[in-house]
Amino acid sequence: MTSAAIEVFLQTLIAGILLGGLYALIGLGMTLIMGVMKIINLAHGELMMVGMYIAYWMFVLFNIDPYLSVFIATPILFFLGIALQKFLINPVLKVDSILPENQVILTVGIGMVLANLATIFFKSDYRSTPVSYATNAFYLSDYWRDSPIELSLSVPWTVSFVLAVIITISLWFFLARTDTGKSIRATAQDTDAALLMGVNVKLMRVVTFGIGSGLVGAAGCLFLPIYYLFPSLGGQFTLIAFVITILGGLGSTIGAIIGGLILGVFESMTATYVGMGWAPVGRFVIFVVCLIFLPGGVASLLKRKKLGK
Amino acid sequence: MKKYLPLIILALLAVLPLTGLSTYMLHIMILVIMWSVIGMSWNLLGGYCGQVSFGHAAYFGVGAYTAGILYTKFDLSTWWGIPLCIIVVALFSVVLGYIVLRLRGPFFALATLASGEVMRITAENWVDFTGGTMGILIQKRTWVDKTWYFYIILLIAAVTFFLVKKLIESKLGYYFVAIREDQDAAESLGINTTLYKTVALCISGVMTGIAGAFYTSYMGYIDPHVAFALHDISIITIMIVMVGGVATFWGPFVGALIMVLLAEFIRSMPGLGTAYQTFFGILLIVIIIFLPNGIVGDYKKLKRLVGLGRATS
């Protein structure tokens, strides 16, 4: 390999990891909801779109930086998620019907309404946030004068990635250390046992949906400076979140993080070496391969290793 | 009387073009019947066999593109797409079924959803073969008048209806329902669930593909966003069956009638045109919460509700 080829490869790898960190955040919300409620939230991407629009308008109207909007969008999305769960999804859980997939179809309906309302209110224009640091980058040659290869690191991507990592770590702390977090994990593992142990399963469901929505709202804020915004962007992110969930293993937090990184790297590799338009196909190739050869996702690999010890 | 109801409705529909309907009304009827074909085939897989597919656009699009590519590459009439797509879509369903049918419940739903998207992206990027986002334009329409199109889709619908009915009333239908109710129990009773699920998927896919091939001939234009649309095909298909009635013979027809008319009505309202998805979404939410088995499936409940409303008022 020539140095130019190595440069392209490393650059792609870096871009993939940065993208993967953000993907992991999107996947985490879905994995949490899936683990606790055993339903897929097909409105996940649309919730992210709502978060992005909140951050966008905060920036345009009040000149609040999208990264600060995390503190605004996340609570709003949290309560939106709680409301959706309480008033729409919970009633359906009780209804008796032929198809048990009703809840999934319901989330599709919610997503449709959200995406369409966004189209009506904000038009279907592509928007981007003109933050001042959008095109800034760190260059390797600035720090290491004689480096044989040149690599660059975009500032907004890096900041988004770091924030995503911070949010992920704090989520992990929340799940591992606090009572509520432990109750959520107990509900995910075994609803009946959790109920017997005195966990308020119903409340945990509502809270989980809220947290999942809040996470994806935060992810939306982090995505805003590096991506453009349009009302129908939700669908593609729902699929990404879902691919990550499958890749990582259902309901597994660590799996979702690893899954997000794998997907990000793989996607940017396909974009560089096969062609931009094929990146989404790469996403699904990984998905299908995973379903066939590794149905339990990365989480099952981790478990196997633990058992082997 | 009830036995002959399908024939009576078929006869009524058959004389419909003779009553001098406007071209626009005929177009609406063609759409209604085309959507009921898709709805019926989805119902076979989703309603009876319990495999809720979120990606019927994949079959629809493969059918549509089979017809379209026959025209662009081999210079044949698009109508040849209908017989050919039986083979193409059946093969496609078997391959896809091998991957997705080993999954259950939500996994299956999402794998099918992804399959539809994969097909769309492939069609967008494989420009040499599919024409990419430019789509395929059929320059030579067979007829200007819509009457023949109406009869052709009516014939397809009639065949689909009787096929689904015969299938469901045969032993196969009981297998399907057994798989839907409890797959493990069905398997332990000696039903080869994988085989029968594949059969259901194949028939369902082929019927949807035929509707797709018809769509190409009728509309004269397809592109990846039309033929493999997630919301406008896959989700609408589910909505049609949900609104009409899951696992009922007439549900898809009723659903298609309501949905197509509603869509046309909302689109014709000034200022409301873009909001039709909101209305669809709200309708879907309301139906799922209050009439989970659809209008036909929960007909008694609906009648009681209406009756109560009348009694109190």
Image (cartoon, rainbow, N blue to C red):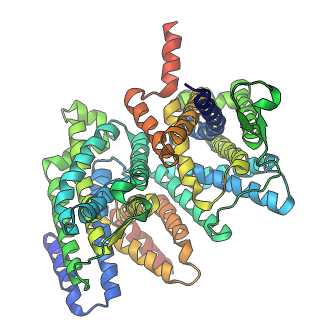
Left or right of A282, for residue A158: right
Residue A155 image point, x, y percent: 77, 40
Q: At x 52% / y 47%, what residue is drawn? A: A276
Q: Where residue B284 sits: x, y (%)?
A: 48, 63
**Residue A24: image x %, image y %?**
62, 36
Please name whichever residue, A129 or B7, is drawn nearer the observer in this view of the structure. A129
Q: Quadrant of residue B247?
A: bottom left
Residue A99 location (% of width, % of height): 38, 50
Instruction: Write the residue at 20% across / 90% down.
Output: B18
Return the residue found at the far bottom.
B20
| Residue toward you, B57 or A307 | B57
Occupied quadrant, residue A284: top left
B313 versus B284 height, above or below: below
In screen coordinates, is A269 left or right of A212?
left
The answer to whether residue A17 is visible is: yes
* B51 over A59 or under it: above or below: above
Residue A195 seen in render: no
Q: How many labels does the image show?
A: 0
- Is residue A253 depicted above or below A227 in this figure? above
What residue is shown at x 65% (from left), y 46% (from top)? A213
Q: Nearer the viewer, residue A171 or A155?
A: A155
Q: Which residue lies furthest to the top in this view?
A: A309
Quarter of the image where the N terminus of chain A is located: top right
